[in-house]
Amino acid sequence: MAHAPASLPPVRAPLLTAMLSYLAVAMRPGAATLLLLAFASGAVTAQTTSSIASDPEVQAQIGLFSAWMEGQIEYRGLPGAVVGVVAGDDLVWAQGFGHADIESDRPMEPDTRFRMASHSKLFTATAIMQLREEGRLRLDDPVVEYLPWFEFEKASPDDPPVTIEHLLTHSSGLPREASSHWTDFDFPTTEEVRELMPYRQAPFSPEVRWKYSNLAYTLAGMIVEEVSGVTWADYLQAEIFDPLGMSASSVDVEDPRLATPYGSRMPDGSRLIFPFVDARGMAAATGLTSTVEDMARFVSAQFREGPRGGDRILSTASLREMHRVRMLENHWRSGQGIGFSVRRVDDQLFVGHGGGYPGNTTNTTIQLDSEVGVIVLTNTNDSNPSHIAGELWSTVGEAVADATATKAEQVAWNPAWERFAGLYGREGRGVTRVLVMNERLVTMNPWSSNIGYTTLEPLGDGTFRMVAATGGGAVGEIVRFVEENGQVVRMITGDSYVVRMR
């Protein structure tokens, strides 16, 4: 989903039926506003979006999640939230719950603005990767090459230079913050950040451990400005917002469509209302404002393939680098890519980010394999958006992933392949047993102390591909069998071979 077309195609009957069905539920008194968007982009059409949104299980899960979310608003006294589910290039479903402003009875809408806080880091990291693609910097460049004034008290005298990659992967060891801005809401200017750096002491040496740092991303934003020659906000507008059609996004701009920022609920049930807070010199770490619709456009950009150009704001190679773990947390259950946090849950890999600002907390969670993402934006500090995102994924997100899954065409089992079963090896070098298991060929090591096997996926023409969950051996490579005089005599796996022993 990139630039929305000037006019969408006529709404077809299935889509209209689905919309009317949803609206009948969503427009009940006190219920939230529902939006079903069909942004035509590339090969994805409104009809495709219609088929996803009208899938019976997707509809059922939308109803389940909506009932739970409405209950959370009521039971927990949350002001409001907007959620969205993205599939490929489409924002399949978006809905507002509760209020953007309680006093004026302004409802949450999909176009309600939120302070995205640390989501800003994803955009700063993207900007750095764009500049790298242009050959204007390298990730292993020391920060001081671009910011000559960059100095601080090192954790150890022999520490190596802090690099750009250290900043982007939270492995620099630098302090988390630049001042007391989260206490007094008085964020430093760029000049003030420069002046305070010599008095900052790094708790850790670079690459010793993952340590989140808003200061590090503030410096990364300064590098973007130094290399590009424009402000961070202007760079984002030209190189990310405009190409993706993110027309509702901005940096530290007061907007009447912003959700009112509420504090955590007090014992008497009341909530403070926070003022608008300008991130100033730390905008690259926390100054972004956006909507669920615009964030969906950014999520969709993570799935695109090919070289940079148009709505492909980065090449495929750069995106893969950003999504890959560069630094593990000490407990090894989550890690850090370039900008993106990375975690594995129940054998599924997720990337994304969260954000927390005075009165706004947000979360974006993306499942790359299925090309489905969920977005949760809230206007209070005690909503726990990461938990809401988890519930949204396990209901609507997984249903959308199932509805959009492309099942690979499988080569039908051929009973003649049973002739490949047997024992293969070379004298004194171990053996491999090929077995037939329920109409599939597998290989296993009968001499191993544990039982395990690797599947041979048929490709046709008597060739197979080695398939396994881990990367050892010749995983992903081609397996074929050699026959002489009507007898199987050899199994070739990748570049190696073994002879049939019996």
Image (cartoon, helix red, strand yellow):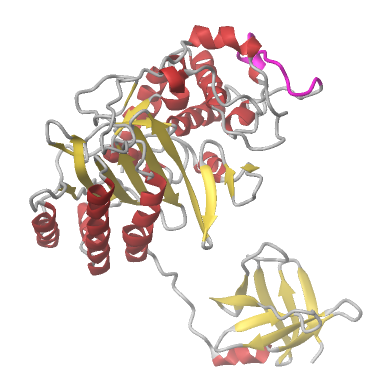
Question: Which residue is drawn at the image coordinates 55% and 89% (left, top)?
Answer: 438
Question: Which residue is drawn at the image coordinates 64% and 19% (left, top)?
Answer: 143
Question: Which residue is drawn at the image coordinates 58% and 25% (left, top)?
Answer: 135
Question: Between residues 390 and 364, which one lies in front from this camera angle?
Answer: 390
Q: Quadrant of residue 423?
A: bottom right
Left or right of 404, for residue 433: right
Q: Magenta residues?
A: 144-157
Residue 364 rendering spot, x and y as whole percentages: 40, 44
Left or right of 422, for residue 460: left
From where the camera sits, is residue 93 visible?
Answer: no
From where the camera sits, is residue 381 visible?
Answer: yes
Question: Which residue is drawn at the image coordinates 47% and 76% (left, top)?
Answer: 410
Residue 110 rendering spot, x and y as whole percentages: 22, 41
Would you say residue 154 sits in the magenta stretch? yes
Q: Main secondary structure of the magenta part?
A: loop
Would you say residue 45 sits in the magenta stretch? no
